[in-house]
Amino acid sequence: MNRFLAACRKQRVDRPPVWIMRQAGRYLPEYRELREKAGSFLALCTTPELAAEATLQPLRRFPLDAAIIFSDILLPLQALGVSFSFSENGGPRLTKAWDNPQAWAQLQLPASWESMAPVAEAIGLVRQALTPEVALLGFCGAPWTLACYLIEGQGSSDWTNVRKAIYRFPSELKALLLSLGQAMGSYLAFQVRAGAQAVQVFDSWAGVLPLERYQAFVVPALEALFHTLDGLDVPRILYLGHGSHLLPAVASLPVEVVSVDWRTDLQIAAERTGKAVQGNLDPAVLFAETSEVRRQTQAMLQRAPEVGYIANLGHGIWPDTPMAGVEAFLAAIQEKP
Ligand SMILES: Cc1c2[nH]c(c1CCC(=O)O)Cc1[nH]c(c(CCC(=O)O)c1C)Cc1[nH]c(c(CCC(=O)O)c1C)Cc1[nH]c(c(C)c1CCC(=O)O)C2
């Protein structure tokens, strides 16, 4: 049985499936070694054998129910004409900020995803290596979160330029979000054709917007994105960062699972959306004594619905996370009575 896919479809399972957002990464010594060997993060992402290896590393160490293909949300933007680099401390930096409608008009919607062939190849390699019990996820950035990086040119704590753009260029920004939604929908379909069995769309910065703006600007773009996958029979997950106030917008979206962070109660998320839910332990908890990690994980499980639940963190695992914290988190889920 594939616990992960069953839970996405709200089928009953023996225990909650679990995976960890950003489970391949710097908290693993073997990842740091592989990245050193690759020379750079981008080289690691674009060399199929190395990307497949990075994807599989956490599964060799931990009893996880899903793998997520090793890549980054910014990579497919290259096919639209956007160039960027990753700084030494890991953050993305665009070569220029795409912060006005004249720039947006120059984004080219790709006719094919041929330039992303290494991702498809890596997906094929990982599928060959996985047993049928472990599901492989494809992913992309949500239109809004991608627009955040495009317009700001890098990460930000308050995304002031993006928020100004909503009011300065409303119709052009709506069109940009819709184009990004269409492009990412076809990029996910490309990953599914290569072998991805479920997909997750990361809207890490969803919570920057009030509900009314999210409904008006983002929901149409997410609908376009997710409808591209209609008929492909893969569960669709939307990760909603800082999104407690946005749950009413999720209920009508064509997704099977909503993934929430620690600010959003799991039970409330399930009730308000009617979807399966994923999440939501604060990554900071993994720094506690192992007995406290267990208690916090058990408390999370108590708020989780009986069916339609996937255990996870509420956001990506941090690079300095102690291995003991990860192990205690996973053990508490495996032991669930
Ligand atoms: C916003 C975002 C990005 N990338 C991603 C998001 C959405 C999830 C989130 O909110 O965390 C998603 C992502 N990035 C990466 C993966 C695949 C690996 C996995 O999840 O196991 C996934 C699913 C690899 C990565 N992406 C990045 C690294 C670190 C690069 C390195 O090895 O130096 C990895 C392993 C770099 C990256 N890429 C991005 C940032 C902000 C950073 C720097 C901060 C950080 O490192 O956490 C953009």
Image: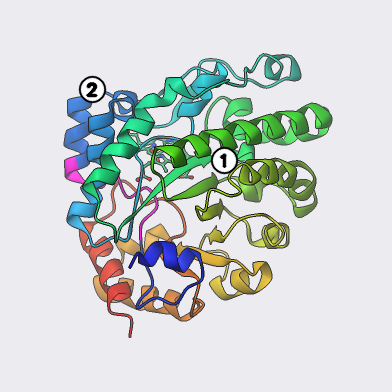
Residue contact between numbered discs 1 and 2, judged by CB atoms under 8 Å: no
SS at badge 2? loop
Q: Alpha-carbon distance for marks 1 and 2?
A: 29 Å
Quadrant of residue 171 within the rendered picture = top right
Q: Residue at x 30, y 57 (%)?
A: 134
Query: Is residue 255 visible in this depiction of the protein?
Result: yes
Q: Which quarter of the frame holds ligand 1? A: top left
**Residue 258 picture location, percent across and down:** 56, 60
Chain part drawn in magenta: 19-30
In percent of width and height, residue 102 lies at 74, 14
Q: Residue at x 36, y 56 (%)?
A: 20
Which residue is at the front of the view, 283 or 127?
A: 127
**Of the numbered discs in the image, which one, if any, rests on residue 39?**
2
**Furthest residue toward front:** 231
The image shows residue 297, relative to residue 132, as above or below, that is below
Quadrant in which residue 51 is drawn: top left
Q: Which mark is residue 157?
A: 1
Camera-side residue: 116 or 149?
Answer: 116
The numbered disc on residue 309 is none
Q: Using the image as rendered, state which of residue 66 and residue 132 is in the foreground.
A: 132
Q: Main secondary structure of the magenta part?
A: loop
- Residue 291, x across and y down, in percent: 27, 76
Classify residue 186 by image quadrant.
top right
SS for tag 1?
Answer: loop
